[in-house]
Image (cartoon, rainbow, N blue to C red):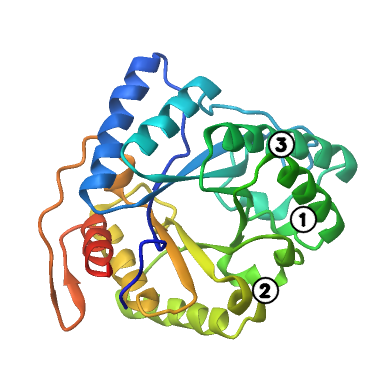
Amino acid sequence: MVRNENFRRGLVLGPLEATEHDEDFKRAHLKLLDRAVAVGATDLQLVLRWLQTDYTSIEIAPYDSVHDDLLTWLIDQAKRRKLRVMLTTRLAVENESERAARKLKPQDWERWWWSYRRLALHYARVASMRKVSMYAIGSELSSTESQADRWRKLIKEVRRIYKGKLTYFAAAEGFDKVAFWDQLDIVGVSVDQEKPRNEAQLLERLNGLTKKLSHSPKVRDLGYVVSELGCGSEPSDAERDLLCQRALFQSFRDESQLQGVFIRSSSSSSPEAPAAARTGSKGGRPSAHSGVEVASHWYRNSKS
């Protein structure tokens, strides 16, 4: 499907972590920004990770996230390259898996929300000052998603600060359980292609998701963006990235409600990744040698 210039052809950067020397961070991320431009990306998702010590904790801290001066520098550098930026907050639980934040059980929900509000409003101010194009106020906080009144109150506060588009990234299997989509501008869906066996298995799973999305009234009203969390929980692997991102391409390329995709791969997280080779297509399928080349094929060949 041909997409217009508003379609978000994105890469995921992050979680953005502090380095001992700011110049090391800048040098590495300038390479990543140039890499994003080279593969035809129009958008970046900058992921900011905060931490709580366990499932019952009521305190949330920045942990290893970059400081604001580096973050604003990175946003400005992206905008100089005509890349749109989405800020995304992602909460982690110390010494637990990436998906641990789905199962939070704080001792005191009121105090937990006070701490989370502080995080959300802080980055709303950064998003407003740097005029980023989208702000995701949370990601996969499944145990909070039924607390619609609290989310509505927070979204209202964020909108007083930040005037751009707002979203929230729900886990793919639970996006229909989110009770506050009507307060946001677009539905966000996180896709984690965990433990892939083969491409057929991935396609079956993703095709089930696209069918579910196409039948959702909220998705029909708002449209949606997809953010790829990764391809299994193990360290990144180029062959596995290729498998997952080919499946993502095949499943989502013709979905009319899709307004953007943000792809993570070993090439988008490592500044030393080699330059993408040219890609071709055969039978509608990209003949690529790494996941980021699938992205490049998709992004360049979907332009009007």
Which residue was labeled with disc 1?
A: 144
SS class of the residue under badge 3?
A: helix
Q: Residue 217 occupies which quadrant of the picture?
A: bottom right
Determine if residue 193 is in view: no
Residues at badges 1 and 3 in contact (C-beta under 8 Å)?
no
Determine if residue 117 is in view: yes
In what quadrant of the picture does the N terminus appear?
A: bottom left
State the residue at coordinates (73%, 67%).
Answer: 182
Which residue was labeled with disc 2?
A: 176
Give how far across and how far down residue 6 sits, in percent: 41, 61
- Is residue 84 toward the left or the right of residue 301 in the image? right
The local crowd at label 1, few if under 14, some if 14 to 19, many if 20 or more residues have their Cα within 10 Å, is some
Which residue was labeled with disc 3?
A: 121
- Name the mark nearer the viewer: 1 or 3: 3
SS class of the residue under badge 1?
A: helix
State the residue at coordinates (49%, 76%).
Answer: 257
Q: Closer to the camera, 276 or 43? A: 43
The local crowd at label 2, few if under 14, some if 14 to 19, many if 20 or more residues have their Cα within 10 Å, is some
Q: Is residue 284 above or below residue 67?
A: below
Which badge, 1 or 3, comes first in the chain's sequence? 3
Count of marks placed on residues: 3
Kindly report the distance in space between the C-alpha atoms of the residues bearing marks 1 and 2. 14 Å
